[in-house]
Image (tube, rainbow, N blue to C red):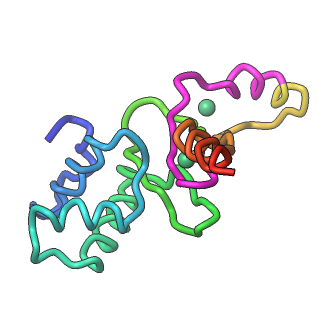
Amino acid sequence: MTMFYENLKGCRASKNRDEVLTVMEKASSPLTIDEIYLKIKKKNNSVSLSTIYRIIDKLSSLNIVRIAATLDDNKARYELVKGQHHHYMICNKCKKMIPIDICPVEELEKKIADSEGFTITGHKFELYGECKNCAQKEKEHTNDF
Ligand SMILES: [Zn+2]
Ligand SMILES: [Zn+2]
């Protein structure tokens, strides 16, 4: 466990919780609870979906994970709070979330906030559209005609 999980101090050791954290560390984009569950189930058949819900709930309350986005399928995608915040390009078709390396909002938010005397505590920025793979599939499909 890294220093980051200091928030877990005083919590009971839990193999399932450690697995959830490992799965999330390895993920290249935020995961739904279902996706986390399936990844862990592959290694450990005895885990239940409700256990994963409980772990994510607990980790959220400890500010170790957070909801990165809730897409139009109404499923929350979770990511680790650790490190820099991320923004994503989200494919409307396959729901893939592609991280954006920069934060386009930071500069802008200072300017906007200053003029209103508003104290900003956070922001959201998401781009929606169609990913490369889905665009490609569509093209192939169109060529059938
Ligand atoms: Zn896609
Ligand atoms: Zn940002």
- Which of the 4 image quarters holds residue 33? bottom left
Q: Is residue 36 left or right of residue 86?
A: left
Q: Is residue 141 magenta?
A: no
- Which of the 4 image quarters holds residue 115? top right
Q: Is residue 92 left or right of residue 2?
A: right
Residue at the spot x=68%, y=45% of the render?
128
- Which of the 4 image quarters holds residue 38? bottom left
Q: Is residue 115 left or right of residue 88?
A: right
* 60 w.r.t. 110: above or below: below
Specify the farthest residue to the right.
Answer: 115
* 86 w.r.t. 90: above or below: above
Counting every numbered tag in the picture gives 0
Measured as percent of width and height from the top left, residue 9 is found at: 19, 51
Measured as percent of width and height from the top left, residue 108 is found at: 77, 23
Residue at the spot x=56%, y=53% of the render?
69
**Magenta part of the protein: which range?**
90-111
Residue at the spot x=60%, y=55% of the render?
93
Measured as percent of width and height from the top left, residue 122 is found at: 64, 41
* 136 w.r.t. 106: above or below: below
Q: Is residue 104 magenta?
A: yes
Measured as percent of width and height from the top left, residue 90 is found at: 59, 45
In the depicted view, which residue is nearer to us: 66 or 72? Answer: 72
Residue at the spot x=10%, y=62% of the render?
43
In the depicted view, which residue is nearer to us: 53 or 34? Answer: 34
Task: State the quadrant of the N terminus.
Answer: top left
In the depicted view, which residue is nearer to us: 3 or 139? Answer: 139
